[in-house]
Amino acid sequence: MPDDLKAAARQKVSDCSKVAEGAGRQSLFYMVDEDDLCRVFAFSEYAARQCLRNPGMIRELLESGDLERLYPTDQYQQYVARAAGQAADEDGLAVALRRLRHREMVRIAWRDLTGRADLFETMAELSALADACVQQGLDFLYPLLCSKYGQPEDASGNAQQMVVFAMGKLGGRELNFSSDIDLMFAFPEAGQTRSDHRSISNEEFFTRLVRRLIDVIGKSTPEGFVFRVDTRLRPYGGGFWTRNAAWK
């Protein structure tokens, strides 16, 4: 590493250590390998900034053991579900997902830059994180809309669920740190929601659901965003949705 880059990284480490000590936490120098910390801060401005904002993050990652291990297949679904379960409403969900995303992005970057994970593991974990955020976001928002508009049903009274197609790098499990997630959305059949108050068409219901999901995941807030969402890769243009019949 060039001397000037190393010096800048050491200054960032020193700044983070002072913030940690000021918050009553142990200095980062005593908790992690100094060379690892300098390497991460030298090559990831994002990781350095997040550690400065939240000096307890590295300690929590170390104590959990998550910096040292490759997650099992369903780990992100569990972590994101737990974060979503602590949210009281849509705004709370957006905050919870962004804070979890910061933690996991620092973890993934750390493992990548210190050689604990190879390129394929890094891309797979980024893709798994995106998958979990989309799935758990839908699982949270769907019942909220059902409580307001009723459950969407087909002509036979069967409940309708959203189907999400991952395209591009996410579909290929090759997501990188700066990737948008390319998504298309579908629902099985036309129909109406079952409601005693305000029934709407399935098309309107799922369009509202997708728009709220995109806001929760992709909107820039003071906490940042979860993933930027690109819905331009959809058949026929126009809306956010397509019925499954269009794929046959």
Image (tube, rainbow, N blue to C red):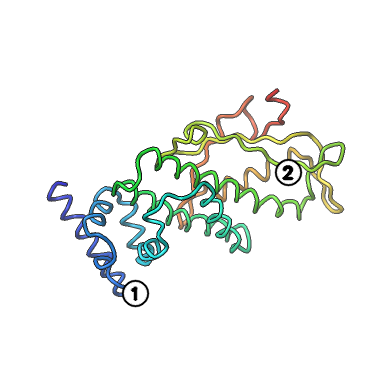
* Tag shown at residue 23: 1
Furthest residue to the top? 248
* Tag shown at residue 175: none
Quarter where residue 131 is shown: top right
Q: Which residue is mark 2?
A: 205
Badge 1: residue crowd in 10 Å (few <14, some 14–19, many ≥20): few
Position in image of residue 76 (x %, y %): 51, 51
User: Residue at the location (67% across, 45% down)?
Assistant: 209
Secondary structure state at the residue bearing disc 1 = loop
State the quadrant of the C terminus: top right
User: Residue at the location (84% across, 47% down)?
Assistant: 194
Rendered view: 218 above or below 10: above
* For residue 39, side relative to residue 140 (left or right): left
Mark 2 is on which residue type? Answer: Phe
User: Residue at the location (35% across, 62% down)?
Assistant: 58
Mark 1 is on which residue type? Answer: Ala
Q: CA distance from mark 2 to mark 1?
A: 47 Å
* For residue 221, side relative to residue 192 (left or right): left
In primary-sequence order, the first of circles 2 and 1 is: 1
Rendered view: 240 above or below 10: above
Is label 2 in contact with label 1 (beta carbons under 8 Å)? no
Which of the two marks, 2 or 1, is nearer to us in this view? Answer: 1
Q: Is residue 136 or residue 232 the one in the foreground?
A: 136
Position in image of residue 169 (x %, y %): 47, 33
